[in-house]
Amino acid sequence: MTARAASTAAQPGAAPLPVRPADQLAGDAASGVQRLAAAMAELKLSAAVPWLQAGVAAMMEQDWIAGGDHILKALELDERNALGWRLLAICREKLEHFPTAFEAYETALRLSPDQAELANDLGRLAQRLGHLDIAEKFYHAFLVRNPGHIEAVNNLACILRDVGRYQEAIGLLQPVLMAHPEEILLWNTLGTVLSEQSDVDQSFVFFEEALRLDPTFAKARYNRGNARMSLGDPQGALADINEALEGTTSGFERAMMTMSRATVRMALGDLAGGFEDYEERFSPHSTDAVRFVTDAKRWHADTPIEGRSLLVVAEQGLGDEVLFANVLPDLVEAMGPDGKLYLAVERRLVPLFQRSFPTATVGAHRTFKLNGHQMRTMPFMDETEVEFWAPIASLFKRFRPDVASFPKRERFLTPDPERVAHWKARLAELGPEPKVGVLWKSLNLDGTRGRYFSPFDLWKPVLATPGRRFVNLQYGDVSRELAEVEAAGIAVWNPDGVDLKQDLDDVAALSAALDLVVGPANATTNIAAAVGAPLWLITTPDAWPRFGTSGYPCYPQARCFHTGRFNGWEDVMGRLADAMAEPL
């Protein structure tokens, strides 16, 4: 990296880049500024030194823009000054210009390979950017020369946790914690490891110990709040998260905590407060915040909509795109016959949404990364001009202010009637028994996601229920699971002629043709419910779309089987098996 490139790569005042979740990430780029300032005494007198001194003086006052400008002047005079590159990296990191900060650290390390601290800095920054494999290598290199370093051990353990290598993380943390039992950060991080591998009860103990050592430690209080939510205590979770928010000034921590509070408030039935907090997903500090590329004005809940033109962009996961579409019939009615609606959805949903909202123009959105930002475009719009645009979840602030505002609507998406008839005929060939579609997992089971789904073995008593004909709706490779049940003498029909992951319009039709769909909340159960299929839904304690009820207001026909707390799978699957044996 050259000084000229550094000067043009991130101008002062540019918007900060979004960062990945790093709620336990330890270390502050600015913590060594005073020590680095002392190192300038060893520099040979040159024209660059006054600029370095001016830069450090500004950094000591936390003026990262001026500090970076002064350091750039020094580097223009001496591009091989490793200290200057490290100081510039600190300024860029503090301004959250993470890609250029990373390049500056790399340049400093290349010029001064004996400075082990730079490997730790690079690991921390790579971790913030989500490059976990790169970060892991830097931390290992640093720990070879600095065994037991608290900050590096903590951050490496976070990486191992985030990629699901829980036992390695525990093995790394335990000996260091035994040697340093006063280190609250390590108690806290060990708690998060246990929580994410579903040992929530035990994780609570570690968060409590961190708070005993330091009652003001906001990260531990926030994580204890999440643990309380997992244990079925949303009121306790809300109290902890509120107190944690009062104790942190970090932009990305506040965004993360506010988003967590949003779902807790929704789970308690506080839709107005929950969706107000949910707007934090667009904070520049928010993890993976998406930037929508459009010239239209942002629509807000109090903006008149009748007779206007509006672009609505779907967001979050595919299941969320479907769930939030619950408001679209209300939106079409509010816009009236003179309004013009444009819908941008995931490409596999386009046929289903176009059929469901024939007066709208429906097309696919496209998402990509640019300079570390998540960008979402709407290519189908071309040169089309609209007055307003809105992310789909923000419509809930206007149309779903409370639970009473959910209509008892049979369905809000329309499956292809010809394909429904086709699947009804195919299913009739299987015999007279009720046809029950089953799903048991999400395709994405990385990290903490796996704890949201019951072990497949617990499904076998359900699938062995006599007088039922079970139909596989589970997308992805399920050959192992289907072979297991077949070996146990259980028949599950696997429909041919449909790709359960890609052909979502046909999945909607197949779901509508079934007598019942059963499974956890994933993309397919949301689609099935939206087209009006009878649904039995397995829900976890933090299932915010229940909105403080015992059901699922977006899908009034859904019968919910609640776990009550994580790891309550034996009980809920037993209740599901008993219900399946009853007349449908």
Image (cartoon, rainbow, N blue to C red):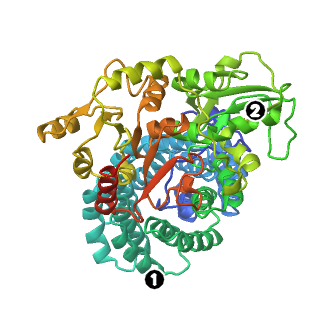
Which numbered disc, 1 or 2, marks the residue that appears first in the sequence?
1
Q: Quadrant of residue 316?
A: top right
Q: Where's residue 527, x and y in %?
A: 50, 35
Task: From the top left corner, tell me how far across and down residue 168 is, in percent.
Answer: 25, 57
- Residue at x 44%, y 65% (from the top left corner): 230
**Residue 493 horizontal side relative to residue 532, left or right:** left
Mark 1 and mark 2: span between their CA atoms? 55 Å
Residue drawn at x 59%, y 57% as measured from the top left:
547
Q: Judge by depth and name the residue closer to the eye, 41 or 89.
A: 89
Please tell me whether mark 1 sits on a helix, a strand or a loop. Answer: helix
Mark 2 — residue?
332
The residue identified by callout 1 is 213
Three-letter code for the amino acid on which mark 1 is drawn: Leu
- The crowding category of the residue bearing disc 1, from other C-alpha atoms within 10 Å (few below 14, some 14 to 19, many at least 20), is some
Residue 72: x and y in percent read 65, 42
In-image side of 403 versus 104 (left or right):
right
Q: Residue at x 27, y 70 (%)?
A: 174
- Position of residue 144 in the picture relative to residue 328 (left or right): left
Mark 2 nearby-residue class (10 Å; few <14, some 14–19, many ≥20) = some
Q: Nearer the viewer, residue 363 or 422?
A: 422
Q: Position of residue 140 (x, y in %)?
A: 31, 52
- When asked about the image quadrant of residue 274, the answer is bottom right
Q: Looking at the image, which residue is at 59% across and 46% down?
A: 554
Please tell me whether residue 477 is drawn above or below residue 194 in the rendered image. above
Residue type at mark 2: give it.
Val
Q: Is residue 389 visible in this depiction of the protein?
A: no
The local secondary structure at tag 2 comes to: helix
